[in-house]
Each structure stands twice: as C-alpha cells, then as structure tokens.
Image: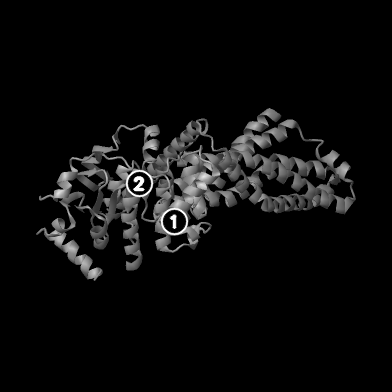
Amino acid sequence: MQKNPDIQNSQAKETIISVKNVYKAFGTLKVLNGISLDVVRGENVVVLGKSGSGKSVLIKIIAGLLKADKGDVNVLGCDMNTISNKDLQKLRLRIGFSFQSSALYDSMTVRENLEFALVRNKPQLSRADIDKAVKKVLDDVQLAGSIEQMPSELSGGQTKRIGIARTLILEPEIMLYDEPTAGLDPVTSIEINKLMNKVKDEYKTTSIIITHDLTCAKTTGDRVAMLYDGKFLRQGSFEEVFQSDDVRIKNFYDYNFITNP
Amino acid sequence: MNTETGQTTQRAGILGGLRDFFAGMYRLYKFIVQFFKQVFIPPYEIREVINQCYEVGCKTLPLITLTGFITGLVFTKQSRPSLSEFGAASWLPSLVTIAIVRALAPLVTSLIVAGKVGSNIGAELGSMKVSEQIDAMEMTATNPFKFLVVTRILACSLMLPLLVLYSGGVGILGSYLNVHTNELTSFRGFMNDAFSKISFLDIFSSVIKSAVYGFTVGVISCFQGYNATNGTVGVGKAANQAVVISMFAIFLEETVIVQFVNSFLR
C-alpha cells in the first residue's frame, strides 16, 4: 500500500490515537475484526464505510463509551483497557464527540446545553467567563441568534452545529465526528464540512470523521481509511484509496455517484 | 408426535421466560446496588435533586389534591349507610381517618405518582438513552447514573412521604365536608374524633412505607428508562413498564408491610 509523502512525514509527529488489532462483537455479530489505526496530532482521518461496517463502534471504543473485546487502544497516552473511571473522566474533557443525532439535551435551551459541561467541569469560571465562552463557540458555528432556542426549534443543520459547538466549548484536543453530514441537504453538508475544517484550523484539533459521504471525505480528510466488514481495506489519501482495483472499494465509489450524482 | 413437539416447545418457552425473568431481576439488583454505591460518593447533585423534587412534588400536587379530597369524601359517603344501620354513624370520622392514614393515602398517592411520575421518568430517560443523550453526558465527564438516576430516585423517595401526608390531610378534609353537611359537626369536634384512634405508629409506618413506595417507583422507572432499547418503540415500552411494574410492586409491598406493621399493633 502506497503512502502519501505528507503522511510519511507525519509519522515523525506524535501519534495521539493508536488502535492495534481491535476486535469487537455484539453477541454472535462480529463488528470489528482486528483493525489497526494510528492518528497523529493535527491530522483529520476519515473512516469511510457502508452502514453497519463498524465505523461508529470504532470511535465509541476510542471515546471509552464501549470496551474492545481484544486489542490495544491508546488515546493521548492513556491505555483504554486499563484506564480508571477517574482518569477516563479527565481524558474525556480532552475529547469532543459530535453524535450522529447531535444528542442535544431536549429539556435544555441551546445556552444550557453549551454551559452544561463548562459549569460542571470548570467551577472556578465566573458567570461572565461562561457567557463569553458560550458566545465565542456560537459565533464560531454562526448561530449566535439561537442562544435561547430549544433543540426542537432548530433545523437539522443547526442541530449539528450546536452539537459541535457543545463539544468545542471545552476546547478538546481530539474531535470525533459520527456521521456529521448524515440526513442533511447538499448545501448544509458543505457548510458542515467547512465548519469541520475551520475547527481543525482554529482549535488545532485532531479528528476522526466517520462518514459514508465521499464529498465529506474528500473535503475534510487528510487521510482516508476504508472500513469493510470490520477490517480496513485500504488507508491513504482520498485519491490513493479510490485508485484501488478492489471491487468492494469501486462499488462503494460507484454507489455514491449513483445515489449522490 | 405433534403433541410431544408442542409440549417441548411450551416447556422451552416457559424456561426461556423464567430465564429472562431471573436475568431481569439480577440486572435490577445490580442497578439498586449501583444506586447505593453512588448515592454516598461526592459530588452530590444537590441542585438536580431539588429540581427533581419540584418535578415530582409540586407538579403532582393538583392531581394529588383532587384525588385525595375525592377519596375522603366518597369513602365517607359510601361508609355512612352501613354504619348508620348499626347506629354507629358517629364512628365515621375515626373509621375514615384510620382508613386514610393506614392505607388509602399511601396507596392511592403512590399509585398516582407511579402513573404520572413513573411514566414521565421512563419516557424521559428512555428517550435520552435511544437518542444518545446519555452517552453525550458521559462525554462531558458527567456521571449520567448519578445525575439522572440517583437524583430521581432520591426525589421520589423524599417527596412521596410528603405527598402522602398532604393527601391524607386533604382526604380528611373531604371526609369532614361530608360529615359536616350531614351532621353539622364542628371542625374541632370532627378532628378530635378523627384522631382519637390514630397512634404515632400509624403515621410513622405510613410515612416509612411511602418512602419505600417512592423508592420503588424511582428505581423501577429509572431502570426501565435507563435500559431502553429499540428506538421509539423501546421508549413507549419503557414508559409503560415503568407504570405497570411499579404499581404491581407497590401492591406486593403493601401486602408485606401491612402484615409486618399489624404484628406490632397487636
């Protein structure tokens, strides 16, 4: 497998997410079959794959929401197999997770959703500091006018943006995006893609983006990893991955063009 | 041959049902153990407990007021003919008060709380679970079990005894209305008669068992909601089972507690 020169250079950089030979099954259903992935600081890695291929399970294992059955997962120097609950709580403050459904708290306004993590984890902050932080992230996602709205009053794209803003308020080092453009129209998808790139540049984050949207993969990914039946078929730049003769990768590419001409 | 196959299938079905039942009981046991482990460990979510007490207590008050008052009024009205037949209508205040304090107020209030609060908790937590809000909370370094479950169980356990005392008071007022309308009894005279047969143990046991019922409603509703699966269908199921199982458990507990308390009263 060929590697992009940039990626070869990046190997000299610090690896902050390392997944080695990870297996995960739910009952008799094998979801991950010994996958390995290294992500270096500052990199945007896109994990592509069809629904049910284990993409979301992978980032949930990285975030510590699920435990791997077998294999090693190391995030920001912490071994996820042996990490204590207390250390996991601390680690999670350094990881932002943008959920597929955005997972905004229904009973809270946008402001309360954004403040929730800040108030609980940084009790030393004054009211003015909290208001300033909320205003900043809302400006960053261009939704300053939605501060007093309830999640049910937001559109799909706005919900995604607020979901991202909620994670940014803690200024994470790692961002994990689970299907950020799923269910959005093409124009809103492009806006979300731009937002993810902006987050990378302004917040200096390292990201793993889970998607089946090729436009998203091409515009946001420094590197693409193609997941199929719980294994990575190929990793590299977008062009490298899709220059492959592997029929499964070709089918995935063609399918995207047929469904998203 | 067919009969034999049918019997085998039936036996497998019964065994499967029993296995699921005991697996569920074991999960519930672990859930309760986790509650007792977490309730004493800081940080204490005092603000959220107060918020939940408001949700459980204040928002249920109108319903409790109405049902408590009607229970006292109707029970007095229905008991009057039988007692009058034996010339014992003057026993009405004490009879009704004993019934309200020992059984009606705790039972009726708990069932109403199970219906209103239990379904609310089951649906709310179930919806949070299936829409990944609980995972999102975990990602913000917040312990969702402590923030969502412990606070709700505490609120139910603390507020139900207060609601039962209030409901009992309103029920006795309902009874007084009927007695006063028929016999023009004074309020003071009614109250003297009403509490002549009530001991401290009656009120104490009523408060304690209300706390037990509150704990039951909280635990079962949170357990159903927190473990909801299968999307919106699962949310509906969680809300429904929170009510049905809570009510069933309250009746079972009432039977056991009555036997236990009566052994002291003898």
> How many marks overall?
2
Taking the image as shown, residue B32 lies to the left or right of residue A16, namely: right
Q: Mark 2 points at which residue?
A: B11
Q: Residue at x 14, y 62 (%)?
A: A250
Q: Which residue is drawn at 50% across and 42% down?
A: A119
Q: Name the residue under label 1.
A: A139
Badge 1 vs badge 2, beta-carbon distance below 8 Å: no
Taking the image as shown, residue A128 lies to the left or right of residue B262, namely: left
Q: Which chain carries label 2?
A: B
Work out which quarter of the rendered image holds the C terminus of chain B and state it. Answer: top right
Return the x and y of residue A184 as percentages of the image width and height: 35, 64
Q: Residue at x 61, y 40 (%)?
A: B254
**Tag 2 secondary structure:** helix
Q: Distance between the residues labelled 1 and 2?
A: 64 Å
Q: Which amino acid does label 1 sit on?
A: Asp
Taking the image as shown, residue A161 lies to the left or right of residue B247, namely: left
**Of residues A127 and B233, which is closer to you in this image?**
A127
Q: How crowded is mark 1: few (under 14 residues within 10 Å), some or many (20 or more)?
A: few
Q: Which amino acid does label 2 sit on?
A: Arg
Residue B252 appears in view: no
Nearest-to-viewer mark from 1 and 2? 1
Taking the image as shown, residue B189 lies to the left or right of residue B100, namely: right
**Of residues A2 and B155, which is closer to you in this image?**
A2
Placement of B248 over or under A90, stated as above or below: below
Return the x and y of residue B262 as percentages of the image width and height: 67, 32
Disc number placed over residue A177 in the picture, else none: none
